[in-house]
Amino acid sequence: MESRDAGFWEKLEAVAKALSKVTGLIGALCLLAAALVTTEGVLVRKILGWSTTWQVELSVFLLMYACFVGAAYGQLGEHHLNIELLIIYLSPRVRETLLAVTGVLSCIICVVIAWYAWPMWWESVVRNDHSESLWGPPLWIPYIFLPLGVTLVFLQSLVQVRSRIVLLRSGTFDKQAVRTELKDVTITADAEPVKRGEHE
């Protein structure tokens, strides 16, 4: 039974990781596209004197995707905002337990937001809502970014919480606090910061 459960969690973790990576890549492309669309709008308006009808709205939609759906990629590497002033001074077990608890709270918050956001998106589909701009795109497209994003963050947080609990039970967690914003960098006293793995 335990091996079956472990297999399920391994598959779920692989799916969540793959989805986070794909949506993160698309989010990066959306940032690039938003910059290009905004630049095109400025050039068309200032140089050719044409009015812009879709550039600003499209760039906002692209940034919404990068922000909401791309958040799962930030959660994948635990590169989200952390306040570590106190947590790095806690004992390893207390620190890991606190991180597991905050992970559970994050999952609950994601569920609450998704609970209200998915029906909001579905209503925009049923009513066929469109933007009031001259371009007038269907609003179900930007409305899906929030529920999709929090659902992906929930999946990623869920597998991370489960992994942290497994490590706590087995006692194989890190014995030393690692600052999340510096965990890919090794700081030496007489040298520049070096990325881990460069000289290994």
Image (spheres, grey):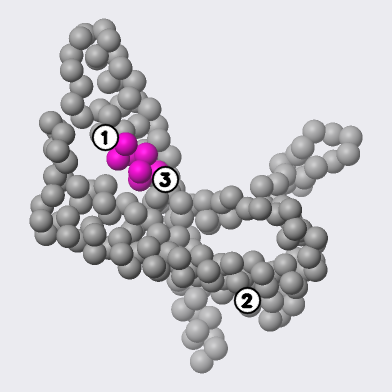
- The answer to whether residue 64 shows anywhere in this view is yes
* Residue at horizontal 75 percent and vertical 73 percent from the top: 93
Circle 3 or circle 2, nearest the eye: 3
Amino acid type at image mark 3 = Cys
Report how far apart the C-alphas of labels 3 and 1 lie in the structure.
Answer: 14 Å
Residue 72, percent across and down? Answer: 46, 55
Q: Specify which label sits upstream in the sequence, 3 or 1.
A: 1
Residue 99, percent across and down? Answer: 64, 66
In the image, 135: left or right of 95? left
Q: Specify which label sits upstream in the sequence, 2 or 1.
A: 1
Front-lying residue, 35 or 22: 35
Amino acid type at image mark 1 = Leu
User: Does residue 64 lie above or below 111 as drawn?
Assistant: above
Q: Which residue is mark 1?
A: 58
Residue 158, percent across and down? Answer: 50, 70
* Residue at horizontal 89 percent and vertical 35 percent from the top: 190
Q: Which residues are magenta?
A: 60-66
Q: Which residue is mark 3?
A: 67
- Label 1 secondary element: helix
What secondary structure predominates along the stretch shown in magenta? Answer: helix
Label 2, residues with CA under 10 Å away: few <14, some 14-19, many ≥20: some
Q: Which residue is mark 2?
A: 165
* Residue at horizontal 38 percent and vertical 27 percent from the top: 35
* Residue at horizontal 51 percent and vertical 65 percent from the top: 106
